[in-house]
Amino acid sequence: MPSNGSVEPIELKARVANIIFGYDTPAGRAFDLVLIALIVASVLVMMLESIAGLRGAWRGTLSWAEWIFTLIFTAEYITRVYVAPNRWAYIKSFYGLVDLLSILPSYLGLFFGDLNYLLIIRLLRVLRIFRILKLARYLQEANVLVRSMLMARRKILVFFSSVLVLTTVFGSLMYVVEGPHNGFTSIPKSIYWAIVSITTVGYGDITPHTPLGQVLAALVMLTGYSIIAIPTGIFTAELVQQVSRQRMDVQCSNCQKNNHEVDADYCRACGAALPEAIEHK
């Protein structure tokens, strides 16, 4: 029979773990909101420190603020490791690695120079806000998108390979037509121009000057507009198929309509209640 002295620390540890890792209690939601506010504030401090004028005038204040954030996140990480039900699982998890990387640059900077700009990785931790918003109900829709991309991966790979071949050909031709004196100093740089042009971005840092080069550039741009809809069509087709698979082949007893949503309780056409045999997945 354990004594009160041994039970209370265990209960306290479980209570702290529920606050830190949980989100279904007021304390857990409050903890996450405060943590997100600290993360955003620390990233803003890092951004302000990158501005030369502010860095010169407020360097001491910004440096102190950054170290305060670092110590807070260090204490939070140590607490998470201590109260985690499975410590190694947390340490090796995605969020465990992000939590560690969010504090590591400040300490490494003491020995290897200024690495504070790597602290932008803290912004990834704002992903925890999805737990507060209870977006788990959208997980099924997210899975549909992921499955659509996976099913279309071969077609998209073929399309990507075709575009890569086209940009290589166009870039090589432009290198021959324009040459180094017009900015096309190498085939890789010419391929870069072809990629920028075929994606209709057009930075304008390299432009053709000869009539033949301009004709080739026009052909590249028209090709870009012609193929830009292909990956969209591929993905849309797969998405339609995945959505159709999500529908149940259950017939309404009132209007005989079928293909209702997985979580549907009523008919999409007449509003009548679906048969009680429907089981939500």
Image: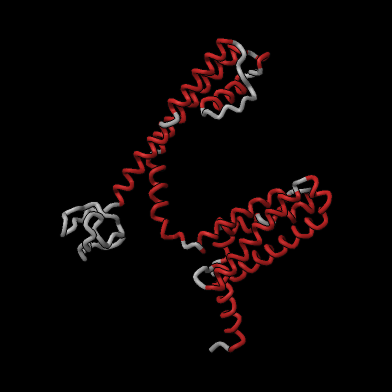
Q: Is residue 183 above or below residue 101?
A: above
> Residue 66's x, y, as percent?
74, 58
Position of residue 190 in the picture relative to residue 267 (left or right): right
> Residue 216's x, y, as percent?
52, 15
Instruction: Look at 29% across and 47% down and name the residue there.
Output: 244
- Asked whether residue 84 is in view, the answer is no
Q: Nearer the viewer, residue 113 or 6?
A: 113
Q: Nearer the viewer, residue 81 or 216?
A: 216
Q: Is residue 245 above or below residue 72?
A: above
Instruction: Look at 62% across and 58% down and name the residue there.
Output: 99
- Dividing the picture into quarters, in which one does residue 80 lie? bottom right
- Dividing the picture into quarters, in which one does residue 6 lie? bottom right
Position of residue 167 in the picture relative to residue 238 (left or right): right
> Residue 32's x, y, as percent?
58, 65
> Residue 147's x, y, as percent?
39, 46
- Asked whether residue 254 is in view, the answer is yes
Position of residue 105 in the picture relative to residue 278 (left or right): right
